Each structure stands twice: as C-alpha cells, then as structure tokens.
Image: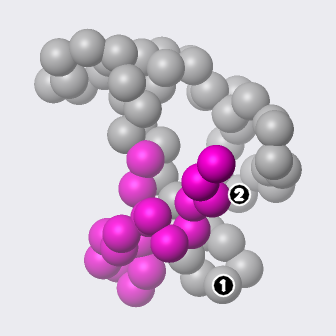
C-alpha cells in the first residue's frame, strides 16, 4: 500500500525478493518473472487498485 492509498500488485512470479510493506525504490529488483497459477506462459501481472477497485495504470506509467 502506497502513502496515497493506492495498492500495486505483481503476480505470477517465480521468486519474490520483497514482502508486503517493504520499502522499494526505482530500480529495485522485487522478483523474477514466472508462470504460476493458470497462466499459459511467463509474464508479470501488474495491477493498480484504489479503494478495492482495479484502475487503469497507464496514467501512472511514463513513456519514452
């Protein structure tokens, strides 16, 4: 949970290097891509939620 109340989720990892509540900064490695659950191949499921509802993450991501 971020200071502004947003929640970020990263799923289908093969290994995690952080735990919920850990402080992470830009560039930190938080895990390794995996294929857990019912996924059909290795990938990262990234999600942002606010007040328990998923929201579009594109407004939070910088583009090149």
| Residue 11 x, y percent position in the rendering | 41, 37
Residue 30 showing in the rendered view: yes
Give the left or right position of residue 2, taking residue 51 as reference: right
In the displayed structure, would residue 13 be above or below residue 47? Answer: above
- Mark 2 neighbour class, 10 Å CA radius: few under 14, some 14 to 19, many 20 or more: few
Circle 1 is placed at which residue position?
Answer: 4
Q: Which residues are magenta?
A: 46-64
Depth check: 58 or 40 in front?
Answer: 58
| Residue 24 x, y percent position in the rendering | 80, 49
In the displayed structure, would residue 27 be above or below residue 48? Answer: above
**What is the basis of the colouring in this image?**
one colour
Residue occupying image coordinates x 55% and y 76% = 6
Is mark 1 in CB contact (under 8 Å) with mark 2? Answer: no
- Mark 1 neighbour class, 10 Å CA radius: few under 14, some 14 to 19, many 20 or more: few
Give the left or right position of residue 7, taking residue 36 as reference: right
Residue occupying image coordinates x 43% and y 47% = 46
Residue sitting farthest toward the front: 64
Circle 2 is placed at which residue position?
Answer: 21
Depth check: 60 or 12 in front?
Answer: 60
Q: Secondary structure at mark 2?
A: loop
Residue 57 counted in the magenta span = yes
């Amino acid at each position: 949970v971020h200071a502004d109340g947003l929640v970020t989720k990263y799923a289908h990892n093969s290994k995690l290097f952080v735990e919920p509540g850990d402080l992470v900064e830009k560039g930190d490695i938080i895990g390794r891509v995996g294929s857990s659950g019912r996924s059909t191949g290795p990938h990262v499921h990234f999600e942002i939620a606010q007040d328990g509802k998923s929201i579009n993450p594109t407004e939070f991501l910088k583009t090149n």
